[in-house]
Image (cartoon, rainbow, N blue to C red):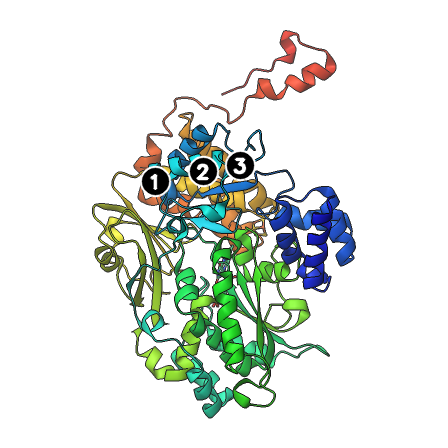
Amino acid sequence: MTTATAAAIDAALRRHGGQRVALVQILREVQAHTQWLPPAVLTAVADGVGLTPAIVQGVASFYRFFHLQPVGRVHLLFSDNVTDRHAGSRRLAGRLCERLGVALGQVSANGAVSVGYTSCTGLGDQGPAALVNQHQVLTRLDETRIDDLARRLLAEEPTTAWPAAWHRVVPQIRKAGPLLASPPLLGESLQALLARGADATLTELATAALRGRGGAGFDTARKWALCRAAPVPAGGTRVVVCNADEGEPGTFKDRVLLSEQADAVVEGMTVAARVLGASQGFVYLRGEYRFLLEHLASVLARRRAAGLLGRGILGVEGFDFDIAIHLGAGAYVCGEESALIESLEGKRGVPRIRPPFPVAQGYLGQPTVVNNVETFAAAAHIAGRGGAWWAGLGVPGSTGTKIHSVSGDCERPGVYEFPFGVTVAELLAACGARDTLMVQVGGPSGVALAADEFQRRISFDDVPSAGAFMVFDATRDPFEIAHGFAEFFAHESCGFCTPCRVGTELVKRRFDKLARGHGSVFDGAELQALESLLHGTTHCGLGATATNPLRDTLKRFPTAYGRRLQGPRFVPGFDLDAELAPARRVTGRDDAGAHLAQEG
Ligand SMILES: Cc1cc2nc3c(=O)[nH]c(=O)nc-3n(C[C@H](O)[C@H](O)[C@H](O)COP(=O)(O)O)c2cc1C
Ligand code: SF4
């Protein structure tokens, strides 16, 4: 190990006090220097945090952004959501590899560059996009940009010399409501909270009937009340966590809230802290949004200096609350709140067995509230303007506004804030979509709708949405869309439970087989069986929703499957004879009887 590497490890360990809960952060910071994590580095980190190398290796291997094999000094990952593919991402990635003379997934001979794919990077409104060393983003890629990029990479130009415009991320707020249009909240809601008191503020939240914006739609006031009532272990505190993992493909509204309305989000977290009696807070920021880190850190610093965070907030003795930012490292499942807490504790992001729920025993066994970015922003405004105001927006059961991340086949991709109850057709008209075949609302784990359902309303009781609104026009193929989402879930399954680990892979392989033209009626039945299996038997919501795109597209677009399921005879999904080849080699037997024929 070089002296520079040893120094980088030392510095990262010191920054985090050698605490094992900071393992993910330490690995991130070390890898920023070393590009990848060779065994000697993992061992040194393990020594530093007092864990075995096997545990550290287990953690590192869980997260996609940690590399246990060398990658290029510039490591480029193209966003690989279905909408990115439609916008040409795969063609552009191929073009770049060709220009560089490097195969996808391989490191160039001189070690300068490697190119690969990653799940949706949250830039669906300005793609095709790519991540550079999981640190910077490239947006609006096209042939010209790719050719220029290839030239600079071949010349080994430092990334800092690349044009700033390549990294530009535009908020693209197309329609703003109270969450996106308000001036920054700089303590106004905290003043209102202090004037009203914690109990009355919780009552306002209940009056508002705010439901969580992260997907499940849990009653926010109820969640806070449960946490508030949970006993705190000796020497501990309650904890407030902002879920900014935003890994659902097609979702990017939290990115915009964090870049444009960070004060409201932090103010909402601080309101929660006062109501709960919490002194510790975290923003769990997805690794793909690393480019927002400096901005968020400066907002926190400014608020500390203004007495809106830290000890004695607004001069009130005992109102102590501060927030740390924890960067994720590329794992969709870490958006699931108990997996997120595991990750915050420096572990593999495997969802916990519940109960106990995080509100009772969350971060390090302490009562913890996890809310979505948008939920905290809404809570801040409710604390300031009152629950009745919020309840007056939207529709019964789904109060307030909802921000939609609109992408795909439309003229005006971006974020749209509408009161709940807006119809799918209204959103399509607003974003300039034409000839729409299908809309995927809420991301792959949400619901796919066909044209005869576009009068349905976005609300918890009709079409719920965690924020993604992907538009597909009549040139697209619902089978291919569902195939892309099946690949996503198989890739993101954390592997903890068998039905999801194996089931998502079997679904993907079955899709692969149909795509190759080897489908028969048998495969349709098999897909249906897998669909019901996954819905009922998995440990967390990832597996339970992984076949939603299959379910919805099979039901709504049967012809997209029909022509792929017409093979007259069953074609096996694997080559039995080839599978037996190693056995023939080992036994030295290669007669006719050692070549089993596959029965149809
Ligand atoms: C696989 C999976 C991924 C999730 N990803 C996110 C996410 O990125 N952001 C989020 O807020 N909630 C996500 N959730 C939901 C969280 O578990 C949790 O319900 C939410 O953070 C609670 O906040 P809310 O009540 O404000 O919605 C995810 C759930 C699952 C099962
Ligand atoms: S359902 Fe999938 S993601 Fe969730 S715990 Fe099981 S294997 Fe992991």
Q: Secondary structure at mark 1?
A: loop
Asked if the residue at tag 1 contacts the one at tag 2, i.e. Cβ–Cβ closer than 8 Å, the answer is no
Q: Is residue 549 above or below residue 175?
A: above
Quick check: is the Cβ at mark 3 less than 8 Å away from ligand 1?
no
Q: Which residue is mark 1?
A: 142
Q: CA distance from mark 1 to mark 3?
A: 19 Å
Q: Tell how many labels.
A: 3
Q: Secondary structure at mark 3?
A: strand
Q: Is residue 248 above or below residue 358?
A: above
Q: Which residue is mark 2?
A: 152
Q: Quadrant of residue 321?
A: bottom right
Residue at x-position 48% and y-position 37% = 153
Residue at x-position 32% and y-position 57% = 414
User: Hey, what amino acid is under mark 2?
Assistant: Arg
- Is residue 575 left or right of 209 when viewed as pictured? right
Q: Position of residue 517 (x, y in %)?
A: 40, 25
Query: Furthest-bottom residue in view?
Result: 195
Residue in front for this viewpoint, 215 or 405: 405
Residue at x-position 52% and y-position 72% = 300
If you read the primary sequence from the N terminus, does the residue marked by circle 2 or circle 1 appear first? 1
Q: Position of residue 40 (x, y in %)?
A: 75, 44
User: Hey, what amino acid is under mark 3?
Assistant: Ser
Q: Which is closer to the viewer, label 2 or label 3?
A: 2
Task: Tell me, for residue 114, which label it has, or none.
Answer: 3
Q: Is residue 293 above or below residue 555?
A: below
User: Hey, what amino acid is under mark 1?
Assistant: Asp
**Rendered-image quadrant of the N terminus:** top right
Q: Which is closer to the viewer, label 2 or label 1?
A: 2
Q: Position of residue 479 (x, y in %)?
A: 36, 38
If you read the primary sequence from the N terminus, does the residue marked by circle 1 or circle 3 appear first? 3
Quick check: is the Cβ at mark 2 less than 8 Å away from ligand 1?
no
Q: CA distance from mark 2 to mark 3?
A: 14 Å
